[in-house]
Image (spheres, rainbow, N blue to C red):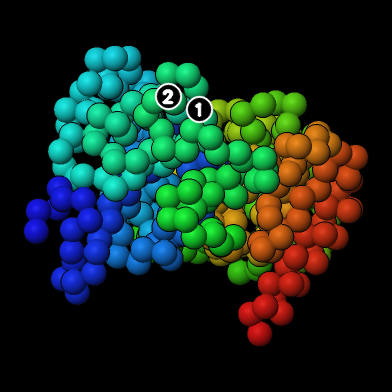
């Protein structure tokens, strides 16, 4: 049967559904959307999931568990503006007939694209006046779900009418990424290592220099190799501004990995201590022990973005986020927890 038919049958005679996920936001947002993919696959094991993603994060979406196909949306280039939207639609319109679309982030554009691509139903938590005529959950109240992972997974429940499960997001690391990391970055490293990611998009969230200096000393003293990761010239500038004694102990892997290679590096590590939420979410998706640093003690933001209790992770906030001894002690607890889980 033609794959353009909604509710077609697969080789086993089971009804097959086609779902479209639209999320052209940032690194961590893309990873969090996997909670929806996993729930859809659990309820509809034979479903086919197409993911529309921001060009920069193709390598994120294509390796998420449950995603079958990825379409790149280059919102700052090829698909910018109305002409770009029409170009995108022209390329993909008619390829599949989607039983439902789920739109997260940039809702107006996502809802309109989903509608023109032929989605039978559309679910989103954003209900602007322009979007309302096209969405299937006009009167849904999300007040019972604060965490971003839950809010996204709930969209699938609205379609299936079956309660969503809180599942660990999963990023499947390509074998060539693991091989690259082992052969090019870790070939001479014989001790366990801890990754520090001190740089964010917002400088006020970056690790204070005193904090990373003290953490490097503590990590090194306990027999681990501290490794710094990050992207952009800012990351190298940050590293170069550190005291020589700190740099002598801290390996700088900034700008040395792609996203899949960073995932492989995280998987090989004992722990990630991160100020960057995107990298923190990648740690969750690779089952890497995590200390997630939040300098601001904003209760709502923490409830929305901090790692859920299903993960081997700890959020450190406010004044504790400046306490290197506290951070490292909590880190060692999490490392030990993974050790016992693997026995």
The answer to whether residue 240 is visible is no
**Is residue 313 visible in the rendered structure shown here?**
yes
Q: In which quarter of the image is residue 242?
A: top right
Instruction: Give the residue furthest to the left.
Output: 1
Image location (x, y in percent) of residue 264: 49, 59
Mark 2–mark 1 CB contact (< 8 Å): yes
Report which quarter residue 75 is drawn in: top left
Find disc 2 in the rendering and name its residue: 131
Q: Where is residue 48 in the image (x, y as percent from the top left)?
A: 28, 56
Q: What element carries label 1?
A: loop
Q: Residue furthest front?
A: 139
Q: Give the side of residue 217 with respect to residue 264, left or right.
A: right
Which residue appears at 24% of the width and 36% of the height? 118
Residue at 22% x, 21% y is 86
In percent of the image, x 62 and y 28: which residue is there?
Answer: 201
**Of helix, strand and loop, which one carries label 2?**
loop
Q: In which quarter of the image is the C terminus?
A: bottom right
Tell whether 255 sits left or right of 194: left
Identify the residue under disc 1.
Answer: 127
């Amino acid at each position: 049967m033609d794959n353009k038919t909604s509710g077609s049958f697969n080789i086993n005679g089971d009804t097959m559904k086609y779902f479209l996920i639209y999320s052209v936001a940032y690194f961590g947002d893309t990873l969090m959307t996997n909670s929806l993919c996993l729930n859809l696959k659990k309820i509809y094991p034979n479903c086919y999931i197409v993911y529309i993603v921001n060009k920069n994060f193709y390598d994120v979406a294509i390796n998420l568990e449950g995603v079958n196909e990825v379409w790149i949306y280059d919102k700052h280039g090829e698909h910018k503006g109305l002409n770009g939207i029409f170009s995108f639609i022209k390329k993909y319109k008619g390829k599949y007939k989607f039983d439902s679309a789920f739109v997260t982030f940039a809702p107006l554009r996502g809802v309109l694209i989903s509608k023109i691509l032929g989605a039978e139903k559309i679910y989103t938590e954003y209900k602007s006046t322009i979007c309302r005529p096209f969405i299937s959950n006009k009167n849904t109240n999300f007040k019972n779900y604060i965490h971003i992972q839950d809010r996204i997974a709930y969209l699938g429940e609205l379609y299936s009418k079956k309660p969503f499960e809180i599942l660990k997001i999963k990023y499947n690391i390509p074998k060539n990424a693991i091989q690259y990391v082992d052969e090019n970055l870790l070939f001479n490293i014989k001790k366990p290592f801890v990754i520090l990611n001190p740089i964010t998009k917002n400088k006020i969230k970056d690790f204070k220099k005193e904090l990373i200096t003290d953490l490097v000393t503590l990590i090194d003293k306990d027999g681990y190799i501290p490794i710094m990761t990050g992207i952009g010239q800012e990351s190298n500038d940050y590293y170069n501004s550190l005291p020589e004694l700190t740099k002598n102990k801290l390996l700088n892997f900034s700008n040395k990995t792609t996203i899949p290679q960073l995932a492989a590096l995280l998987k090989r590590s004992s722990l990630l201590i991160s100020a960057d939420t995107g990298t923190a979410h990648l740690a969750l998706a690779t089952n890497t022990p995590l200390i997630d640093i939040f300098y601001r003690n904003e209760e709502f933001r923490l409830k929305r973005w901090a790692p859920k209790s299903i993960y081997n992770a700890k959020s450190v906030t406010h004044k504790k986020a400046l306490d290197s001894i506290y951070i490292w002690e909590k880190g060692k607890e999490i490392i030990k927890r993974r050790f016992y889980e693997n026995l």
